[in-house]
Image (cartoon, rainbow, N blue to C red):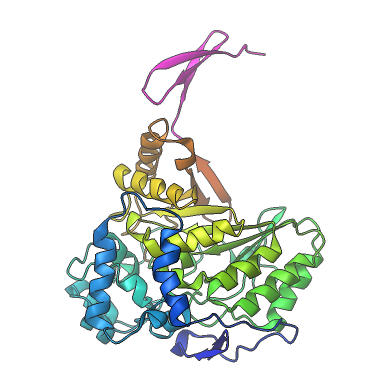
Amino acid sequence: MATLDGEACSYGDEEPPNVSYPSVAPPLVRPLCSPQRSRAFAVADLSAPGDFVGLPSRIADRTRVFRKLFFPEVADRQWNGWQWQLRHRIRTLAELEAMLALTNEERSALSRSGGNLPVGITPYYLSLLARDDGVQPLRRTVIPVPQEFYRAPGEADDPLGEEADSPVPGIIHRYPDRALLLVTDFCSSYCRYCTRSRVVGNGQITPQEQRLQSAFDYLRATPGIRDVLVSGGDPLVLSDGWLDWILTSLRQIPHVEILRLGTKTPAVLPQRITPQLCRMLRKHHPLWMSLHFIHPDECTPESLLACTRLANAGIPLGAQTVLLKGVNDDLPTMKNLFHRLLMMRVRPYYLYQCDPIAGSAHFRTPVARGLEILEGLRGFTTGYAVPHYVIDAPGGGGKIPLQPNYVVGRDGDDLLLRNYEGKTFHYPDPVP
């Protein structure tokens, strides 16, 4: 049982037990859920950023049809409330069976026990899934299939070696000047390719004052750390009060200069990005945010509004995308996604090769595929739409950037370079 801005929400076995607010937390402010606020979210705010050029009407239509079928009595003010979305997440085979035409594989996987990762999908995000298409990209990322129960060679529960780089619970300190702070293992929706599927949703990482104070003590005692990424789980499932207390505590550490939040909330629970949340976040600048988007179908009017609110609050937004087989591993899909993100004022930052977590072989593509996509972007679209393609090296080696080979050799004192059209150019570069 956790308290989310004054409302009690039960999430069953996956919810960390005995969660309590820190004694020094600021007063909590509940979001307004008046009809006026609801209409503002649904209509007025969506028109503020301008038309989302090229947004497929089928996406918005799919949500409208879904609501009419399965939540016909739910008012806009409820649907657009993030606490309502959390309380009504779809988690069981019976619920999914009623809303989707499940394939035999999906039904088999949902009937099994023993998997690392629970199932949880917000009604909003489920509304984006195709009811009758088991291979629809978004559906593949949140509905389990039997392949995730099989461990392929080279896979591991903790492929990145995070536990070896964790000096105290909740802190991962791998790079000299940066640290990762895990504040919760709870997500509003669970991605089947999650790097932390070994712990996410299992109640092992709880937002408790004592545990977090221990993490803050480590950060205070390590002056080389100037940049802290707050992640999980998803930190934005915590209340405004919890987040404010965490960010305030980090801001009180003199050598911590940059704060970052890692979240998929604008894609799966955009209702969480309230004006109240944005006003609170503005107090903690310089604050950056890494958003997890993987497919153009996530770029909805609701996500546009969420990103607009964050950007208008002065928060630089970068996107992290995982390359996934059968989901986004083709150039048109990636280009479409990155163009839409730029229109949402989100800079494509990282394109990740899928980590070799246990049960992820059906998601992983050859590295050559990622390089082909990167080469198809460079020169054919704005540089702002070209992310860094990286492998997070197994065993704790950190992020290693990958690039197509544009240096093709030398001609005396000239370096031979290949451009995006395949043409070769000489650049004066005398050998020392």
Residue nearest the observer in this picture, 209 or 79? 79
Q: Could you say which is closer to the camera, residue 308 or residue 331?
A: 308
Q: Residue at x 78, y 72 (%)?
A: 217
Q: Is residue 96 left or right of residue 240?
A: left
Q: Is residue 307 above or below residue 233?
A: above
Q: Is residue 334 magenta?
A: no
350 left or right of 367?
Answer: right
Q: Residue furthest top?
A: 412
Whether 224 is drawn above or below 359: the answer is above
Residue 88: give x, y in percent of width and height: 38, 84
Q: Quadrant of residue 220?
A: bottom right
Image coordinates for residue 251, horizontal then vertical, percent: 75, 65
Looking at the image, can residue 326 be seen? Answer: yes
Displayed quadrant of residue 372:
top left
Relative horizontal placement of residue 391, taking residue 65 as reference (left or right) = right
Is residue 267 at all visible to an observer of this figure?
Answer: no
The vertical placement of 145 against 340, above or below, is below
Residue 63 x %, y %: 28, 70
Look at the picture and state if 110 lies above or below 375: below
Residue depicted at 34% across the width and 81% down the height: 90
In this view, the residue in front, 386 or 39, is: 39
- For the record, the magenta segment spans 403-432
x, y percent for residue 22? 70, 85
Q: Residue at x 18, y 72 (%)?
A: 103
Rendered image quadrant of residue 432 = top right
